[in-house]
Image: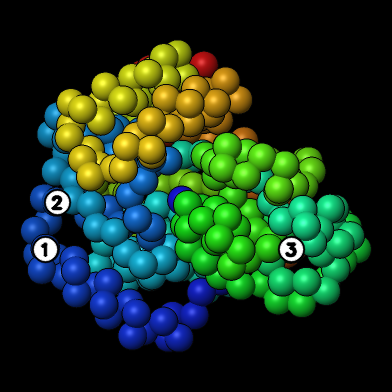
Amino acid sequence: MEMFKGLVSLTASAAALAVGVALIASNAAEAAKVRVVYGDIPSVESLHLLAAFERAKEKGVDIEMTYLKSEDIAAQAVVGGQADIGVGGPYALVQKVKAPIRMFMQLSTLRFYPAVNGEFYKNWKDLNGQEVAVHSRGSGTEAIMKLMEQRQGIKFSKISYIPGAEVRTGALLQGNVKATIVDSSGRRLLEQQAPGKFVILPLEGVNATDEALFANTNFLEKNAADVDKIVEAILTTWREVTANPALVSEWRAKYKLLPDLPAAQAGDIGPYFEELAKGKAFPLNGGGAAAAKDDFAFYTLSGQLTGEPASLKVEDFWDTRPLDRVLAKLGSK
C-alpha cells in the first residue's frame, strides 16, 4: 500500500468517512481492542505486516483489522477516535491541520517504478503535457510524480487516482492507462506478460517513508504496553524476513492469511519478499528520528511539507518512545 502524506479535508470526505466509521463503530466501546485501520485491500505486499499482527496477538494484544477504501479515510478515523492505529504517514495532516497524531514506527520506504507504454513514451520529457496515474491524493506515489515534474522540468496535464498497485499494473497491460507507477510485483508482471512493451523510467535519490504506523497521542500514552508489543512483533518479523524471506509463505499457511489469493499471486510471494529482503527494504530499527529527517528532506522538496527541513522538529511528527523502549530490549541492527 502507498503512503498517505497529503493534506486531507476533514469535511470533503465526510460521506466516505461515515461509511468507514460504520464498519468500526460497533466496536468503539470495546476498550480492550486495538482497532487498526488499513486504507487499502489486503494483498501480497501486506502479508508480512498481517503476520506480525498475528504474532502480536499471540503476545496478548487484541488487534482488530478494518480495511477502508482509502488512506485519507483511515487517517480521519484515527483523528476522530473511531480507530486507534492507522497505516500511512500523515505528515501534511499533522503540519497543516495540527492533528494530534504521531507516527511511531516506519514499516517501509518508497520503492516504486514509474512505468510507461513504450509505444507512446520513452523518457520523462515525453510525459510533458500527458496524463499519469498514481495511487491516491497525497500518497507517496503522487509525491514522487510531483517531484519528478520539478526535477525534469515538465508538467503533467492531469494526475489521476487509481488505488492499488495491482490495479494500476492491470490498467497498463489492458491499455487503459499509458503512464503510471507500480511496485516491484507489478514491474515483474509487466516484464513477464509484455516483454519490451513498457519502459521503466529512472528514479533516483528517493528515500522516504512509504508506510508507518501512527496513532493519537492520547492512545500512545494510555496503551504503551500494547504499542510496545506491536512494535516488537513487527521489528522481530522484519528482521526474520530479511534473513529468510521464505518465512512469509510459512506464516501465510500458519495463520491462514489471504486464503483466497489467486495462484499466480501466491506464486509471487517468494520472489516479492526475496527482492525486498535483498534490497534491504525492511527498516530493521523501525525508522524513528533518522527516518523523520529523511522524510523532511524529501517531502519539503516534493511540496508535501512546507518550511526548511532543518527547521522541522521530529517530536512534532513522531513519538519515538515506543521504538526506543523496544530497541533497548532487542538491540539495534
Res. 10 image quadrant: bottom left
- What mark, if any, has residue 33 been given in the picture? 2
- Residue at 43%, 32% (x, y): give it: 268
Residue for badge 3: 146
- Residue at 32%, 68% (x, y): give it: 77
Q: Is residue 8 left or right of residue 219?
A: right
**Marks 3, 2: nearer the viewer:** 3
- Residue at 42%, 25% (x, y): give it: 270
> Are circles 1 and 2 on residues that touch, CB within 8 Å?
yes
At label 3, which amino acid type do we have?
Lys
Residue for badge 1: 27
Position above or below: 289 against 220: above
Disc with the residue nearer the chain's start (1 vs 2): 1
At label 1, which amino acid type do we have?
Asn
- Residue at 23%, 45% (x, y): give it: 260
Q: Is residue 83 left or right of residue 197?
A: left
The span from disc 1 to disc 3 (Cα, nearest Å) is: 39 Å
Percent x, y for residue 278?
57, 20
Q: Is residue 233 left or right of residue 169?
A: left
The span from disc 1 to disc 2 (Cα, nearest Å) is: 8 Å
At label 2, which amino acid type do we have?
Lys
Position above or below: 278 against 60: above
Disc with the residue nearer the chain's start (3 vs 2): 2
Q: Is residue 237 visible?
A: yes
Q: Nearer the viewer, residue 131 or 78?
A: 131
Res. 71 image quadrant: bottom left
